[in-house]
Image (spheres, rainbow, N blue to C red):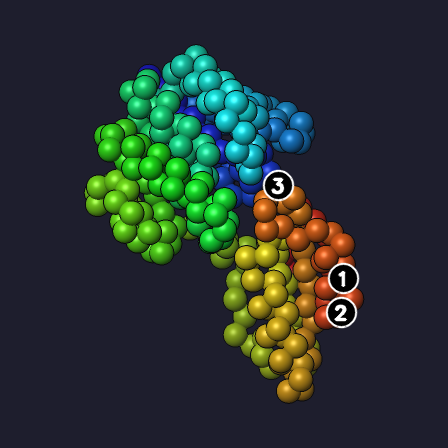
Amino acid sequence: MQKHLAIIINVDWYFNLHWYNRAKAAKEKGYRVSIITSFTAPRLKLQWESEGYDCYDIKISRSGILIFEEVASIYHLYKIIKKIKPDLVHSVTIKPNIYTGLISKALKIPCVKSITGLGVVFSNNSYKFRAIKTVIVLLYKYIGRTNQGPFLFENSEDKLLFQRNGIGRSDQLIQVNGAGVDTNKYQSRKEILTEPQITVLFAARLLKDKGLDTLISSINHCRQIGMDIRLIVAGIFDLESNNAYSQDEVEYLSQKHDFNWVGTIEDMPIS
């Protein structure tokens, strides 16, 4: 009998960037794969359905904390999971992890929870975010007391934070390699520093904790000592995030620090 995997993630473009290939790998191994996410691009839903994935739209506010909206999202997700009856659920990011952890406990379905970063909630020390962090830690602790499945981490710092806060047993906290860069397509070049001009590409979600300011400062320093460096910035505006750059801010920085802002590029060139 075909096994059924449900992947639950906060938004479709994030799934497309980092998780589509993993879903594809599961499908190639014989799994039936359901994608449950907030669909913002109808073309992605149509594409994935044409490829044989089951797609379900759920509204998850990535930054909102209105209790009635959150309860409605949990209930909607509960109904979907109960209806499709997956053999395994794989959730990604904070809200899907918590919602799915609670639901999988109620429905007794195994659930793998990927911690792909802790976000502004854990890095901002304002009273608001400290209060939210307290609630999140308590919910994660509750979920971690079940035997429904592990937490997966892509870096040791996040895993250590869970250990320090007493979230989950040691055998539930598993560190894996991140998605990273496909080195079959993008290969390193040792001779690059011998070229007269070095081109640096910054490609990321345009959040203030992604390191663009540090990169600009480093390149300015290199230029001051005589290095010829061209900076290209490409990225996605993520205005639902509390620490996002606006388009005006990026355009201002590009003029002030002399870099080429090219906008959102879906097909990143290889050469």
- Measure the C-alpha gap from mark 1 to mark 3: 21 Å
Say which mark, if any, is on residue 256. Answer: 2
Q: Amino acid at mark 1?
A: Tyr
Dot 1 crowding, Cα within 10 Å, few <14, some 14–19, many 20+: few
In the picture provided, is 170 more to the left or to the right than 123? left
Q: Which residue is mark 1?
A: 252
Above or below residue 95? Residue 181 is: below
In the picture provided, is 262 more to the left or to the right than 13? right
Q: Are marks 2 and 1 in contact (CB under 8 Å)?
A: yes
Dot 3 crowding, Cα within 10 Å, few <14, some 14–19, many 20+: few
Q: Which sits in the foreground, 241 or 187? A: 241
Mark before the other along the chain sequence, 2 or 3: 3
The answer to whether residue 177 is visible is: no
- Measure the C-alpha gap from mark 2 to mark 3: 26 Å
Quadrant for the C terminus in the image: bottom right
- Locate residue 40, reporting x and y percent: 65, 31
- Locate residue 267, reporting x and y percent: 66, 48
- Say which element carries label 2: helix
- Say which element carries label 1: helix
The answer to whether residue 44 is visible is: yes
Above or below residue 218? Residue 255 is: above
Q: Residue at x 44, y 50 (%)?
A: 122
